[in-house]
Image (cartoon, rainbow, N blue to C red):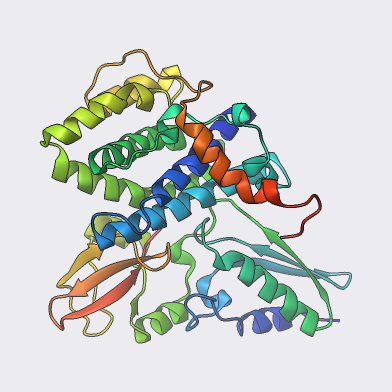
Amino acid sequence: MVSEAAVWEAFGEIADPEIPVISLVDLGVIRSVDVSNGRVHVEFTPTFLGCPALEVMKKAMEEKVAELGAEADVEVVNDDSWSTDKITAAGREKLRAAGFAPPAPRLVQLQSHVHRCPYCGSTQTKLENIFGPTPCRSLRYCESCRQPFEQFKTI
Amino acid sequence: MNAQLLGLADDELVIGWRDSEWTGIAPLLEEDVAFSSIAQNEIGHARAVYELLTDDADALAFDRALGEYRCAPLVELRLLDWAHAIARRWLYETADEIRITALMSELPLAAKINREEAYHRMHAEMWHERLRNEPRFQDAVKELWPYALGVLPAEQRDALSARVGLPVVDAVERGTHTDELAGLWEEMTMVRRSAPVGTQW
């Protein structure tokens, strides 16, 4: 019989398909794991609704649970429970270390509009494009270390 | 409620297709990225709303006859002139904000959509700020204004009028279609229509 802890641990090994430095657990998209009668029920909250990685994530979770010898039932919950505030502290640090500026907490971002460079820490950065290579990212430029970088949008 | 949601989803699907027409030909590389990304988001919103109405979002999106679509005429127009394209983005996002925020208390998905739309509005407002004094842009806004009113039900039009600064006039109403939808319908349903029954994707 598979335990909920084992499922969480296994999901911690699934890399985000588009930002592989963080896991699905770091990303905060798994709302709950419930094991009963040999079935694993997972509540999964999408990030951006148009993100093509969502199907890949769902399939990866099903495969991980199958490896543990159980069957997964992944329920996609399209309510408003995911925001970038759900990304864990460890996830934020991994993003920053990989050159992605992590999203600031919503309350801070909405009031301060300060964006920090993930390379040198300067706040002298400017917006190049609200949009970027995926729906969740903006492009910014650091005027202190002259490095362009990707900013995870706060939503 | 279901008719209202179908209209919303059809608007998002069709404007997503129209915005994606700038992919590869926008006047600035950055706008190529922006329009493509906005289009991707809008089509994602359409899918999520269709899923509230049906188990098969693809079938609802692409297997209907032309006359069964409930999109507003504003989103149907093929606008490959930058002033018009930006005027529509700005008018559509302004109208959409009024509609989506009104839905948020009863529909949790609307609140989720609204988080993403905030970035579409920033983009539209940035361009509006840049072009607002240009006669060509002003003419495009005036031309599209009766279409923009048609995105919203009558009771929400005063709010749009206050935001845009133009008086409420006779709208180009939802339920009618422009001639330009036919070509888009041909294109967006072509692959599914050409596939044999029972095709697995």
Res. B105 in view = no
Name the spot of residue A24 as percent of width and height, x first: 57, 75
In the image, is residue B94 above or below residue B192? Answer: above
In the image, is residue A133 above or below residue B85? Answer: below
In the image, taking residue A51 as reference, residue B195 lies left or right, namely: right
Query: Which residue lies at the image location 34% right of the left edge and 38% below the top edge?
Result: B79
Q: Quadrant of the C terminus of chain A?
A: bottom left
Res. A112 in view = yes
Q: Residue furthest top?
A: B170
Q: How many marks?
A: 0
In the image, taking residue B135 as reference, residue A46 lies left or right, namely: right
Quadrant in which residue B59 is drawn: top right
Q: Residue furthest right?
A: A37
Name the spot of residue A7 as percent of width and height, x first: 71, 79
Quadrant in which residue B78 is drawn: top left
Q: Nearer the viewer, residue B51 or B195?
A: B195
Name the spot of residue A14 as percent of width and height, x first: 61, 81
In the image, taking residue A65 as reference, residue B20 lies left or right, namely: left
Query: Which residue lies at the image location 34% right of the left edge and 21% below the top edge?
Result: B146
In the image, is residue B50 above or below residue A133? Answer: above
Query: Which residue lies at the image location 10% right of the left edge and 36% below the top edge?
Result: B133
Q: Quadrant of the N terminus of chain A?
A: bottom right
Q: Nearer the viewer, residue B130 or B53?
A: B130
Name the spot of residue B56 as percent of width and height, x first: 72, 47
